[in-house]
Image (cartoon, helix red, strand yellow):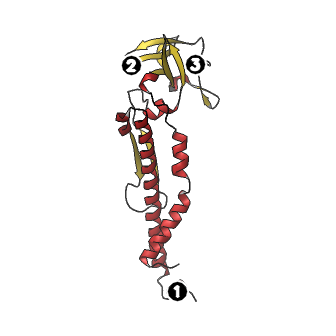
């Protein structure tokens, strides 16, 4: 007869299970928060490597719940927008094709108004003949010929980027791998500390 079973006979198994689930909730939430913080730090360090370190503070994370146990904890790592149109630094540094305008290289950033072709985002080639280049306060934008207020693409000077691009996919793959194993390990460690045997 196991210890857990003998405890059940005395009516304490439900208390043991409740304690075990609480340990699991703390383990799950703690690991999710740690992984989100690691992803945030990795993305910030990549932005620093582009020599525009002041943008790093735009990358942030938000965990739910913010504190306490939860078996279904989750977190989001995101970048606050650089401007009123919602362009964030992760998009600027991870996406886009390069074009040359008047001898200056620009990174082409897709805007929602450009639409999609199937499941992928539209490119300049997809919209050829429907768009034109227009000067803006921040540089250049590509607008629709029939509605110049609709911005299809924003052009960001490559000179502002210098260090290359941010690899969001690599950060996600690295910080997301093995999360279940880490939660299980943390859960067992918390149970052992609390003297829970099930």
Q: First in sequence: mark 1 or mark 3?
A: 1
| Residue at the farthest right position | 118
Q: Percent from the top left, x then y, of residue 90?
A: 46, 35
Can residue 186 be seen here?
Answer: yes
Comparing 147 with 108, the one in front is: 108
* Marking on residue 166: none
Instruction: For the residues labelled 1 and 3, say whether their Cβ atoms are less than 8 Å apart.
Output: no
Report the residue marked by disc 2: 138
Q: Quadrant of residue 65?
A: bottom left
Mark 3 secondary-structure assignment: loop
Q: Quadrant of residue 122?
A: top right
Can residue 18 be seen here?
Answer: no
Report the residue marked by disc 3: 124
Instruction: For the residues labelled 2 and 3, say whether their Cβ atoms are less than 8 Å apart.
Output: no
Comparing 67 with 191, the one in front is: 191
Report the residue marked by disc 1: 3
Residue appearing at x 47%, y 20% in the figure? 155
Residue appearing at x 53%, y 57% in the figure? 179
Q: Quadrant of the N terminus?
A: bottom right
Q: First in sequence: mark 1 or mark 2?
A: 1
Mark 1 secondary-structure assignment: helix
Q: First in sequence: mark 2 or mark 3?
A: 3
Q: Percent from the top left, x then y, of residue 66?
A: 38, 54
């Amino acid at each position: 007869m196991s210890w857990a079973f003998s405890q059940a006979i005395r009516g304490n198994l439900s208390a043991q299970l409740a304690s075990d689930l609480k340990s699991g909730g703390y383990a799950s939430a703690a690991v999710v928060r740690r992984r989100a913080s690691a992803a945030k730090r990795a993305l910030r360090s990549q932005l620093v490597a582009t020599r525009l370190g002041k943008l790093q503070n735009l990358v942030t994370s938000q965990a739910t719940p913010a504190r306490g146990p939860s078996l279904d904890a989750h977190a989001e790592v995101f970048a606050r927008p650089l401007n009123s149109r919602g362009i964030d630094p992760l998009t600027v540094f991870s996406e886009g094709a390069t074009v040359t305008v008047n001898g200056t290289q620009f990174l082409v950033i897709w805007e929602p108004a450009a639409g999609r072709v199937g499941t992928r985002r539209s490119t300049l080639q997809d919209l050829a003949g429907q768009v034109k280049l227009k000067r803006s306060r921040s540089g250049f934008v590509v607008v629709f010929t029939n509605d110049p207020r609709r911005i299809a693409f924003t052009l960001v000077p490559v000179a502002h980027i210098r260090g290359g691009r941010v690899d969001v996919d690599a950060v996600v793959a690295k910080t997301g791998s093995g999360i279940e194993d880490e939660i299980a390990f943390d859960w067992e460690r918390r149970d052992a500390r609390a003297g829970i045997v099930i």
